[in-house]
Image: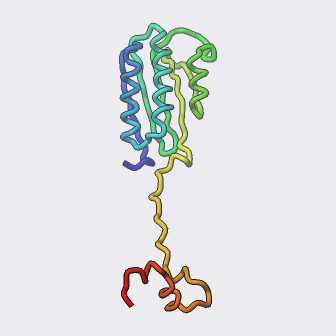
Amino acid sequence: MNRTDPRYYHVEVESSLERVGQMQRIVAAHLRYWGLQKLVTSATRGVGLLLEAAAADPVERVEIETWWTGQHLITAVSHHDASDRQDDAHPHLRQIATLSDGWGSCTTNNQRIVWFSLRKTDHDREPLDAKQPEPWSSEALTVPGTPVAHAKAARPSETAGTAS
């Protein structure tokens, strides 16, 4: 699968701590299918943190959305939340800030949305096939000014085992 094609995944699940590991495995499987193995660890950790934060609140359903733009992986977790609390006070959001390239939070129509983004870096490129060096030519190893016939005859490996 081409890693530059845009992708989208959306799921809605019950909010509970028991679902966190299951949802991390599902998101990880999608990222691997998309060819984003190097982003799996950070992305699933972020999803786990956001789901744990949502499970701490009295909400019933949580939505997880993941977008791959070809350069950035953006993951958002949203749920209905009528509370008016400060985002910076939540410890999970500090961890999200350290593991991601960017993050944000907003509340619209009693829907709380927290997102984070991970950027594809240059070292995430597919490894190139290792090239084998060409074998050395035996003529290239002769001493300058030495005739090739004399150099070949002087080698004991070629003359060993032959009768004169």
Along the line of sight, which residue is nearer the eye, 107 or 88? 88
Q: In the rendered view, tell whether residue 18 sits above or below residue 114.
A: above
Please name the colour scheme applied to the rendered image.
rainbow
- Would residue 117 be found to the left or right of residue 29 on screen? right
Position in image of residue 112 (x %, y %): 51, 18
Locate the C terminus and report the quarter of the image it occupies.
bottom left
Along the line of sight, which residue is nearer the eye, 68 or 49? 49
Along the line of sight, which residue is nearer the eye, 32 or 57? 32
Position in image of residue 24 (x %, y %): 41, 26
Q: Residue at x 61, y 21 (%)?
A: 94
Q: Residue at x 36, y 48 (%)?
A: 1
- Would residue 15 be found to the left or right of residue 43 on screen? left
Q: In the rendered view, tell whether residue 38 sits above or below residue 108.
A: below
Along the line of sight, which residue is nearer the eye, 151 or 73? 151
Position in image of residue 145 (x %, y %): 61, 90
Q: In the rendered view, tell whether residue 32 sits above or below residue 26.
A: below
- Would residue 84 be found to the left or right of residue 73 on screen? right
Position in image of residue 11 (x %, y %): 36, 26
Q: Residue at x 42, y 25 (%)?
A: 64
